[in-house]
Image (cartoon, rainbow, N blue to C red):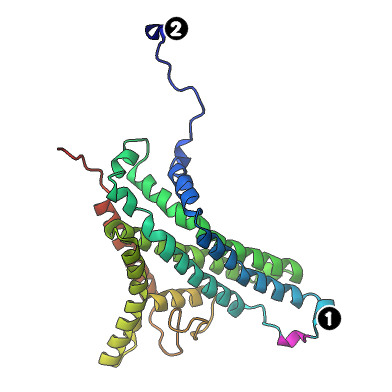
Amino acid sequence: MAVYKRNYKPYEGILTPNWSRFLVPARYALETLFQSRLLIAFLVGSCMMPIFAGAVIYLHHNLSALTMLQIRPEHLLPIDGDFFAAYLSFQGALAFLFTAYAGPGLISPDLSNSALPLYLCRPISRTEYVLSKMAVLCIPLSCITWIPGLFLFSMQAGLQGQGWGWDHIHWAWALFAGSWLWIGMLSLLAMSLSAWVRWKLAASALLFGVFFISSALGAMVNEALDTRAGNILSLGYVIGMIWAKMFQLPPRSTLFGDMFNIRRGDEVPEYMAWLVVAMLCGACILLLNRRLRAREVVS
């Protein structure tokens, strides 16, 4: 058949809806990310804490299992706000490690290979590009933090009955909102570091440094000025304080010590903690906005 007899025909297949187009790059990024066996093993290992917590909840409502294991009910961990706060602290630390591994490699390859114009020349905006990269972190981190947390809360509410779930609904809200606060801050911080630091190992080290150096800086300010206001410079302290307020718990040392630590008597105003988080997220957005610009290269 002669070529000139063929006419142009537009694409007649199914189009991706506008609202979900940002998930297309995320799907391929997730496919590449999960080719790592180490990462899959880490995600499997992150299920150990939910399994342990679920076993504790089950044992609270199964006297026959307690009798067989020769465990007294008073020796079990109580199912209260401290229980769910400890769960969130543990899973939050795992979420931080996951982000340190996966986050720094999200944007830097696109900038190093000048691939950003190829994304933006298609029907996807810079905002959708950022959302697609955030989804690569938000989806796995949700599976680590709030999704199993709400499952544990629902399990306890179903076994306990008698309106327990409605009476303690603020714990479910704390699990959901606290997890998303942590996920959002980690995602923005990791992406901004990935956009400005092209070496993945250096970006991961900087992510660790932001938290641990800020904690050391806060301790130095406290020691030099004989005050406790320096704690507001520690991001771990700030997150721990917000979580404690969400769970309506008194200030205390958490499972991870200085990482999410609120010592009795070291409190700072809650609005200051929220202000620090808002300023950090705003700075990350400004850094991304400055860096993620499609530029035409003229030779």
Residue denoted by label 1: 68
- Residue 100: percent from the left, percent from the top? 41, 65
State the separation of the CA atoms marked 1 and 2: 80 Å
- 76 in the magenta segment: no
Of pointers 1 and 2, the one earlier in the residue sequence: 2
Q: What residue type is labelled 2?
A: Met
Q: Residue at x 72, y 68 (%)?
A: 163
Q: Overall secondary structure of the magenta stretch? A: helix
Q: What residue type is labelled 1?
A: Met
Q: Is mark 1 on a helix, strand or loop?
A: helix
Q: Residue at x 51, y 84 (%)?
A: 250
Instruction: Give the vertical position of 213 relative to 40 (above or below).
Output: below
The outermost residue toward the left is 299
Q: What stretch is highlighted in magenta?
A: 71-75
Would you identify the image quadrant in which residue 229 lies? bottom left
- Residue 87: percent from the left, percent from the top? 58, 74
